[in-house]
Amino acid sequence: MKKKLMATVLAASLAFGLAACGSAAGGDTASEAPSEESAEEAPAEEAPAAEDTAEPAAEAGKTLKVAYIPNSMSNEMNAYGYKIMEEHQGDYNMEVTAFDGQYDSQTETAAITNCIGQGYDAMILCPSDINAVIPAVMQAKEAGIIVAMYSADLPEEYREYRDIFVGVDDTEAGKNAAKAFIDRFPDGAKVIEVGGTAGTDAQIRRHDGFNAGLEGSKIEVLDYQATESWSSNETMDITQDMIVKYGDEIQGIFCHWDGGATGCIEALKNAGIEGTYIVAIDGSRSGFDQVKDGTQNVCISQNVVNISLKALEVIRSAADGGDFEAENYVPLDMVTSDNVEELPYPEW
């Protein structure tokens, strides 16, 4: 059954054709897609399965051609992650090229299929829609390319088609957010939740983790709404609407990311509301700055440097046939006014 499904979705993915990859910012970033005519005659050898040990996917020690395909290079986290990869690619004997997904699943899919044709050895993927890229990911796996998911994983039933996941545990991040509210309001409180882009891996897991963490507590979630994109303008509009609806009932806000919390804070300021307890995830400059100035109470921080370096390290091990972990979770930091000055200031 699964083989038939795979054949069907592979056929569907090929219908996209070899369209142009999105442009991206930065040194070796590709400005246009690799063409079919310039593709190598044969795909890379078979990639390792997602196991602790694997056969080499390429000649051990060879320079690896790696594609970095994030949902958008306009996202500061993705751009900073690529900067780290560029700076350290030589340490792992790699050439990493970025392709801008432009928050568009068809653009991301086209980038994946084009890079398959160009004979890339590995791909680092952070898609805007984890379900939409599954056919292309299956095609990459079939071609023997090492598939590494970066900060966003495939649905559990399709994880056999990726070799590696590197990132934080977003479900755990959501649970940490819930704990922050429970610790602050042991006798209960009413809060709202403002989510990231609907359907993205981070949005789903942060939401699910938050609600799981609140089970059995006295915290009541008055309302929840996800955004259409990771936009602080959207979070400001959503928060303004909820202020109109619930007024001073709102004691706290959980926003899925620090930049989005900026919009929530602006909405509170415009409404003349002070003292709302705000928790957000990411660990960006905006999050640290907001904790410092007291407008955000907790920033649940992920270390982009460690995530990016871990991705390169594990891909290198997989390509050389060494031992590697299929799932690599980088620890989270709880940033508050008590420790914000002691932690390294983020560069994104």
Image: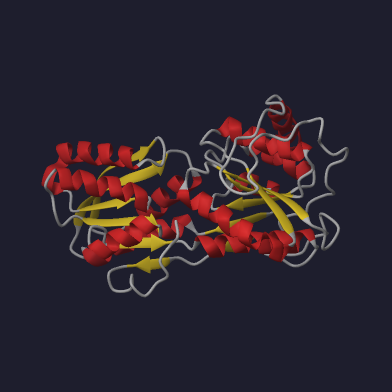
Q: Residue furthest front?
A: 27
Q: Position of residue 11 (x, y in %)?
A: 74, 28
Report the residue at 44% width, 56% height from top: 348
- The percent position of residue 231, horizontal first and vertical second, equals 37, 40
Q: Which corner quadrant of the image does residue 16 belong to?
A: top right
Residue 13 drawn at (x, y percent): 69, 30
Q: In the shown orientation, is residue 231 left or right of residue 54?
A: left
Q: Is residue 82 left or right of residue 276?
A: right
Which residue is painted at 19% across and 59% down in the image? 188
Q: Which quadrant holds the N terminus?
A: top right
Name above or below for residue 324 compared with residue 40: below
Query: Outermost residue toward the top?
Result: 15
Please tell me how many numbered marks the rendered image carries: 0
Q: Residue furthest right?
A: 41
| Residue at 82% across, 63% down | 61
Q: Position of residue 127 (x, y in %)?
A: 56, 42
**Closer to the camera in the image, 105 or 295:** 295
Is 85 situated left or right of 3 in this image? left
Residue 39 seen from this side: yes
Q: Is residue 221 in view from this perspective?
A: no
